[in-house]
Image (tube, rainbow, N blue to C red):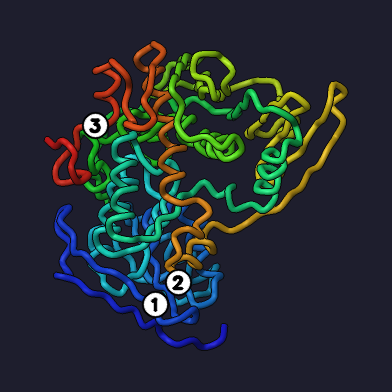
Amino acid sequence: MAEVNRRDFMKTSAGAAVGLGVLSHSTASWAGANDRVRIAVIGVRGRGQAHVDAYASMENVEVATICDIDETILAERLAWVTKELGIQAPKTEWDFRKVLEDDSIDAISIATPNHLHSLMSIWGCEAGKDVYIEKPLSHNIWEGRQLVQAAEKHQRIVQHGTQSRCSPAIREGVKQLREGLIGDLYMAKGLCYKRREPIGLAPEEPVPDGVHYDLWMGPATEKPFTRNRFHYNWHWQWDYGNGDIGNTGVHQMDILRLALGVDLPVRVSSMGGHFMFEDDQETPNTQLASFWYPGKNPNDDKGILMVFEVRHWITNYEGGIGEPPNNNVGSIVYGSEGYMVFDANSYRTFLGREREPGPSATGEGSPFQNFIDCVRSRKREDLMCDVTEGHLSSSLCHMANTAYRLRRTLEFDPAKEEYIGDAEANQMLSRVYRKPYVVPGGEAV
């Protein structure tokens, strides 16, 4: 790589210290497109590896710090970075708050469990960092809106990890829908058919050496350590994850929102269950959610229906998405003249009663490059997966899970982002946060 100048990163700040939720305020000013962006990746066990790999391949971007609460994982990733990627060894840190204190860090890229996403991102904005945040952007609707407001208040670049929006093929397909290729749109469906093995029953045990468990629990209720409340299996525990509808479904519903040109619905229902297995999973392994968007006349039923379905075991394949025995994960939009299938970074159309093949395309974009470009330009409007869109798509997952857990259809006010006449549902818009890991403005214990 050609030699580059160090970035001229100017900050104005009342102080450099980052306390337990009381963070310094700073802003960034970039001298030019050649300035180096110094980034810290937080959470490097799974998806965080892809973050590191993407940034390491970019010119004038330095992976300055990697951070993880599991020091064993941290050591493994450090060896991988230096040996496999061949870049200068980054600094390592197990406490993300110390990363936020580091004024030399320009941006943070977060790939932690869901329950930490909004908190880390908001604290990052308050500390003057730009933020790339993995999906879902939030663990509940209220904290997602708090992050949107923090990004606006502190003028931060905040990108959400629903990366399919960066695909030129997906955007072409959406344009075709808007131009009427398949006629009037009336329904859309997202699929998450994944073979998921049972996670078993894990006993309580001492916290493993090198794991900073209090930091890992963060805002969640304190509970004893088990393997099923930790690496990956946290997805299936309500305290930390949002089930497969929040794990994978946010991608498909984000594409459907983009395709339909809608934000939040006025009604949601969801049913399902935890079938077949006796294990520690709390979230449903089979779930069907429906969202209703009204049409121009709110007094008739000519709106748009969005459906999302999770299946966990043996199932059929819909829409030609994927190939057996692989996962069947994607989205389908139905119109009066045909339907369109979104599969990973591609779209295909089938037109008329005979379902004749129509326009199609495949093409992948880089959400990480788009993020870095916007960090340099400071043009938030150029983000392809910006914080507001991430909040709205994540909210659909939370709405579905609330309806599932309460076992009833819920009416929703999209403008106020609250349920209508349902105090129990509104209580689930947020959570009680464990001190000191409190989303600003939240209720704490």
User: Amino acid under label 2?
Assistant: Arg
The quarter of the picture where the C terminus appears is top left
Question: In the image, what residue occupies the spot 38% across and 22% down?
Answer: 412
Q: CA distance from mark 3 to mark 1?
A: 38 Å
Q: Residues within 10 Å of mark 2 (few under 14, many from 20)?
A: some
Q: Residues within 10 Å of mark 1 (few under 14, many from 20)?
A: some
Q: Amino acid at mark 1?
A: Trp
Q: Is residue 167 left or right of residue 93?
A: right
In-image side of 10 versus 328 (left or right):
left
Position in image of residue 437 (x %, y %)? 19, 45
Q: Looking at the picture, does residue 94 appear above or below residue 59? A: above
Q: Residue at x 36, y 17 (%)?
A: 405
Q: What is the spatial separation of the Cα atoms under label 2 and label 3, in whole angstroms?
A: 35 Å
Residue corresponding to mark 1: 30
Question: At x 46% / y 70%, what residue is drawn?
Answer: 377
Answer with mark 3 or mark 1, whichever residue precedes in sequence.
Answer: 1
Identify the residue under disc 2.
376
Secondary structure at badge 1 equals loop
Q: Nearer the viewer, mark 2 or mark 3?
A: 2
| Circle 3 SS class | loop
Compare marks 2 and 3 and give the one earlier in the sequence. 2
Q: Secondary structure at mark 2?
A: helix
Query: What quarter of the picture does the N terminus occupy?
Result: bottom right
Can residue 76 be seen in the rendering of this structure? yes
Between the C-alphas of marks 2 and 1, the distance is 6 Å
Q: Circles 2 and 1: CB distance less than 8 Å? A: yes
Residue 129 drawn at (x, y percent): 32, 64
The kind of residue tagged 3 is Arg
| Residue 312 visible at all | no
Where does label 3 land, which residue? 431
